Amino acid sequence: MDLQVYGMRNVMEQATTHIAVDAMSGGKAKVHHGNVAHLVGADASMNSASVVNTAEARAISHEAALPLADVATNYDTQFLRFSAQRPDMRILFTVTRGLYHIVARRSAGIAKVEDLHGKRIATFPRTSSHYYLAKELQAHGLRESDIELVGLAPIFEISKAIIEKRAEAICIWEPASQAAVDALGSDAIELKTPGVFASYFNLNTTAAKLADPAKRKEMVELTRHLIAASKLVKEKPQVGCDWLAQAGGWERGLIERAFRYHDYNATIIPDQLDVMADQEHWIAQEQGRAPRSREALATLLDYSVYREAVAGV
C-alpha cells in the first residue's frame, strides 16, 4: 500500500479509517497523524489550534504544515477553511457523521439552550464543535456575542473547564464530552436540538492526486475497505472500540459510552453541499473574506471514486 493516509489518530471518528488502512495494507500501514493541511502543506497559522494560546495548542498547530498526504480525513469545517486558498482540494465522501451536543451544568441554572445566555461556554475555536455551538445558539434566538466563549485546546482541557467550574457549558467532540458527563454525574445536562446540525467527517484529496491513475486506484480500494469497516462496526461496535482504545490511549469504558455519538456510514450524504454552503458564510466571516457561491463550492465535491468503488463491490 503506497497511499499515504492522514487523519487525527486520536479522534473517535477515525475508527473505521484505522480498520480500513490495516485491512488494505495487511497490517503493514497505519493512519498518519494529521489533517487536511497535510494535503496542501498549508500555513500552520490557518490551523484551528493556532488561535488558542497554550503550549498544547501550539504543538497541534505546528503539525499542520507537512505536505505528505494523498488522502486525509477531517470535518468539512476545516476543509472549507483550507480550500479557500486551495480550490484544488476535493471531498470524496463522508466517512463518519459526528452527532454533536452541548454539555452543561444544571447547578449553573441551565435546563435548555436559552439558558446559555451570558454563560461561559468552552469549545475548540474555529472547529466543527464551535460551528455546532453557533448553530444551536442561532436555533434558539441567541448569537455568539450573547455568551462568553472560552477557547481551549486540546479537547480534555475543555472537559476540565466545566469540571473545575471555569465554564458553565462545553461543546466538543467525543470522548471529551463524555468525560465531562462522567465527572459531573447528575449535575450534567445534555442539550441537543433535533435537526440543527450533524458534522460530516470526510475523506479528502486534491485534484492532482485524483488525476494520478495509481493513486486513484488505491483510493477506490481504500473506499471499499471503509465501506466494509463501517458495516463491521455497526454489527460489532466492540471492534471499533478496540481500535480507538489503542490509538487514543483512552480508558475502554469511556470509548464505549461515547461510541453512540457517531454514525460510521462511508457514504455520499445528500445534503453535503447544503451544509457546506451554510458553513461557508460562518467561516468566511471569521477569515475576513467574501463567501464562495454554491456553484463554486460544488466544484469541491468529487464523488467519482466512491461511485467507482460501489460499482465494483
Image: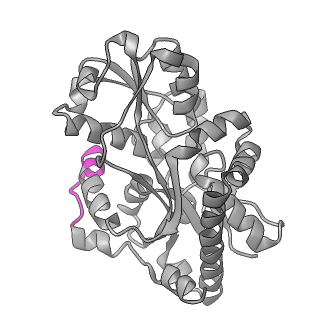
**Residue 41 seen in render:** no
Residue 268, quarter of picture: bottom left
Residue 257, image x and y in percent?
Answer: 60, 37
Which residue is at 46% across, 84% downward? 304
In the rendered view, does 268 fall on the left or right side of 232?
left
Could you tell me which quadrant the N terminus lies in?
Answer: bottom right
In the rendered view, does 216 fall on the left or right side of 138?
right
Question: Which color scheme did the rendering employ for the protein?
Answer: one colour
In the rendered view, does 272 fall on the left or right side of 236?
left
Q: Which residues are magenta?
A: 282-293
Q: Is residue 285 magenta?
A: yes
In this view, which residue lies farthest toward the front? Answer: 235
In the rendered view, does 250 fall on the left or right side of 260?
right
Residue 5, image x and y in percent?
Answer: 65, 65
Residue 81, image x and y in percent?
Answer: 38, 54
Which residue is at 60% across, 28% downward? 55
Residue 219, image x and y in percent?
Answer: 61, 78
Seen in the picture, residue 120 relative to 232 is either above or below; the reply is: above
Seen in the picture, residue 301 relative to 131 is either above or below; the reply is: below
Could you tell me which quadrant the C terminus lies in?
Answer: bottom right
* Numbered-mark total: 0
Residue 122, quarter of picture: top left
**Residue 113 seen in render:** yes
Which residue is at 66% across, 63% downward? 232
Residue 297, quarter of picture: bottom left
In this view, which residue lies farthest toward the left? Answer: 141
Q: Is residue 103 magenta?
A: no
Q: Nearer the viewer, residue 274 or 104?
A: 104
